[in-house]
Amino acid sequence: MTDVQLYDTTLRDGMQGGGMSLSAAEKVRVVKALDRLGIGFVEAGFPSSNPKEAELFRLLTEVELERTLVCAFGMTRRRGLAAEDDPALRDLVSCAAPVVTLVGKTWALHLDKVTRTSPEENLAMIVDSVNFARAEGKRVVYDAEHFFDAWRDDRGYALECLRAAVAAGAENVTLCDTNGSTLPTQVAEATAAVVAELGERAEVGIHTHNDAECGVANSLAAVEAGARMVQGTINGYGERCGNANLVSILPALQLKLGYDCVPADRLRLLTETAHFVDELTNTVPDPDQPYVGRNAFAHKGGMHVAGVQADARTFEHLDPKLVGNSRDVLISELSGRGSVLSRAQGAGIDLDADAAKRAVERIKEREHRGYHYEAADASFELLLRREAGEYQSLFRLESFRVITEKRADGHVETEATIKIWVEGRRYVRTAEGNGPVNALDRALRDAIGELHPHLADIELVDYKVRILDSDQGTGAVTRVLLDSYDGHESWGSIGVSENIIEASWEALVDSLEYAFQPSRRPAAPPRDEPATKGPGPAAATRGAAGSVADRA
Amino acid sequence: MTDVQLYDTTLRDGMQGGGMSLSAAEKVRVVKALDRLGIGFVEAGFPSSNPKEAELFRLLTEVELERTLVCAFGMTRRRGLAAEDDPALRDLVSCAAPVVTLVGKTWALHLDKVTRTSPEENLAMIVDSVNFARAEGKRVVYDAEHFFDAWRDDRGYALECLRAAVAAGAENVTLCDTNGSTLPTQVAEATAAVVAELGERAEVGIHTHNDAECGVANSLAAVEAGARMVQGTINGYGERCGNANLVSILPALQLKLGYDCVPADRLRLLTETAHFVDELTNTVPDPDQPYVGRNAFAHKGGMHVAGVQADARTFEHLDPKLVGNSRDVLISELSGRGSVLSRAQGAGIDLDADAAKRAVERIKEREHRGYHYEAADASFELLLRREAGEYQSLFRLESFRVITEKRADGHVETEATIKIWVEGRRYVRTAEGNGPVNALDRALRDAIGELHPHLADIELVDYKVRILDSDQGTGAVTRVLLDSYDGHESWGSIGVSENIIEASWEALVDSLEYAFQPSRRPAAPPRDEPATKGPGPAAATRGAAGSVADRA
């Protein structure tokens, strides 16, 4: 039995976020992933809006879902039309989804200024539309748009709209904080009043946005006030500041407040599901994301690390395994043997006691010179591999040269020449680029691409440079951090040098070598068996949008 | 009068976040920005931890702050030592900050498992430490670490710790949700109980983290339960999932809940301040950030746009101007006519109406291409001077070439050649450097130094690079921010280009040209009268510490 239903609108409201778009086939993959996680309702889209949406609903009829009910979203009938004569409403009820979610107005200001509809006509629109969907055999959720603004202005009319929907057969009325204006205590007060009034006859739902950075808290406040369904999106995607983030709401409800939302064994799929949806939407996962981010359970401060080692409860709000995440101690202040050993173990590196001791010395020495492994997991792992004797070199550099010229006509040109050895053969390559790092990257990939074509799929997604004023009196150095992404996973590498070009080169080489270590990259073909697959999703995206690091 | 005090810990707890680091001079700039915004308390750091922090507290004594009180953070005395014999505590009370924030334990589990201290000894540590700080004339805030976990386990002992701090003279006890485990209703309940018990004798504060995505809501819940001070960080920086975000807490308290936190006219600096701190920490501003993100008031869905046009209230939770943001995605806070005119006036530039209009157009066009003038005051002023016809060119570039080579023996060399015209004469100069920017800088100063020797005193103190992924489909660009310092004043310049070398060159030229504009630089000799003074304090500093930008 489920105490609180989760209703996912990633595929409808989430797609209003900047840069979001998914094909029908990708949307089906999202629905399947949400079903596996145990989400009760998934809003797939507007069936009326375009043929792609119609195709999606058709595809969904062919998918066997264990737990999820598919919902179709649409508006109440148009003013002045009978419900059965409204083409959008007809499309909505004739699609295969068993649940129809109807959004309608509740706020007098909105009726007056935007839709220019009388309060009475609006009530009739609600009643007719719900009646029509029920008569067609649909289960109906009524989304009360702008509910909390309406409640502040005229709670009598707001309640009347809800009552009309329930009387016409809506099994759920969902209170929407459409423009994200409301704070938790206000949500709690209004929700409690609605539950007291209608809770016997219908389920009350909540739909919030993150404009006041309270999207999650508002959802929790509504549940504590009696709401029993929460609408939100994976990773909080959505217009403006996003929708309520189901990835944070689910563990709070289930682990912290004791409500049943998904089967107990499914919660461990949370991190994986959140990253999978990020991958499909080509979003770089937020490392600081609550519960599922790679920093969510990472510790830096010396005393905190000691605390976690003594008793994890002292510095962890829950066991990361419960949500499928893991404890990741940030490297910086962790030149301790224990943490190095646990990192090596996590990466499947066989580090004996002597090697661990050498690794610790190496880390300390490098941190002293300005390295910082917190955001450079790939470089850190390569360092451990080197000490463990498990490191495989991708190539050997003979020399490189980069030239940037600005000509009298203002035109700027950059060209890099590299000379390297790969598996006993010497390669000399020259490439032009938008900048020195890009030119070096191109020349290098050109040279190694013949033997390792799969490395072409790696996209350099971020490039950051800092000048470090060393505390140790050794003078200033340049630190380059590079983030790479292969369509499945992202990783960070670092380079430190007096010279920005040399520091960039070091980070670039670490990024590619990390991807190349065979034990680490199960998806990549072994190095002596060149991949035959075409460009992956990352490469396709790169072509369309341009890699952000192309310009460095 | 302030109803609720804001206490910023960006410079202490915020710096625990991954990849965060700021120099002492940058921290001073943050303190000044927070003072301007009207934040009451700013925690600058641990005075005991290292000489850099000591330098920061010394620098802060030279800064005149209008409203902000500087706080120094440290722990209660060590077990078994008298407070006055604890070196860390002595450093803490002997620094110049008027407020000392002492963090101490409150949770039995933590005392038992981590610090292995008896509950009685812990109480004595609190009392002794607060007494000592009070005796040294400090105002004291007591941070009760793990307060909410303690409250769940043994509220009697948790309260006893607070009572001890208050009895010893702490004016504020702050309840810390150290590991971010707590949800808003739980925060509200515990806070209300503490306020009922101690509210007559001390102010109650709140310090939360975002592990459950409730950092902001937890802070608001505490205030609604009677807390009167909120600790947090700008943009929610901090370890794991971050600290409570003051940038969201401030407008919620002041605009939505009606508390007074900062003077009413300061709230408009919110967006600018949030972005300025992002710039300094080299953090890419989150476009979806509540209140201050460039998408926070942007609308995509067709019906929403129509709603905004009919009545903004229907789809905006507040007027973006109130927090210094705007509905127009691209226009930043600097591109209004009024702000351009007031900036020009401040710099003594005579900008007429037509020139102001052209400047606004130019700024918009450049912002569209990735320029960002918030941290580049020098480049902004040069832009205004150009439109006003008051710009004096320092030189004319014919061409440059930079070569970086890494030889087979691992040695890296960089050399730049520039050809420029200065006052009718052609100069060709070649210089070596630790990196391409340094080599260009040396060659350029060598060429212009003959006529303008005072420009040698300028030190390039920071150099930051960011890759910007443009929304406009124009592809990614590189943005370089350069901070310069002449021993009296520091200024920022910016360059944007596909090519990092070209972007760096642009920022470098702006930095020197800014210093060269005679009306701007009263300390510099006029351009036709070469300076005879020796190396200034900046040069002396450079010699001792090495310019941090020498290595770029």
Image: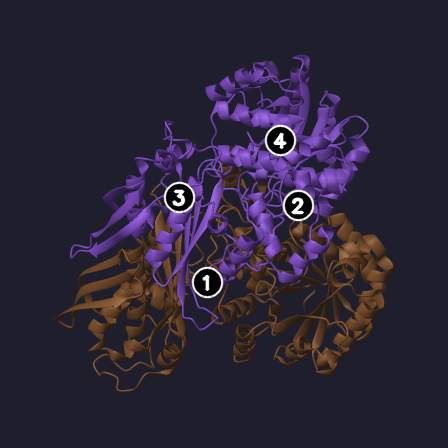
Chain colours: A purple, B brown
Disc nearer the start of the sequence (2/1): 2
User: Residue A539: x, y in percent?
Assistant: 38, 34
In front: label 4 or label 2: 4
Query: Which residue position is annotated with label 4?
Result: A8
Categorize mark 4 by other alpha carbons within 10 Å: few (<14), some (14-19), many (20+). many
Query: Which residue position is annotated with label 3?
Result: A512
The answer to the question of whether label 1 and label 3 lie on touching residues, with beta carbons closer than 8 A, is no
Query: Which residue position is annotated with label 2?
Result: A182
The answer to the question of whether label 2 and label 1 lie on touching residues, with beta carbons closer than 8 A, is no
> How many angstroms separate mark 4 from mark 1 (CA)?
45 Å
Element on which disc 4 rests:
strand
Image vertical order of residue B328 relative to residue A48, above or below: below
Looking at the image, which residue is at 44% across and 46% down?
Answer: A391
> How many angstroms separate mark 3 from mark 2 (CA)?
47 Å
Same chain assignment for discs 3 and 2: yes
**Which amino acid is tagged 2?**
Thr
Disc nearer the start of the sequence (1/3): 1
Q: Which mark is residue A370?
A: 1
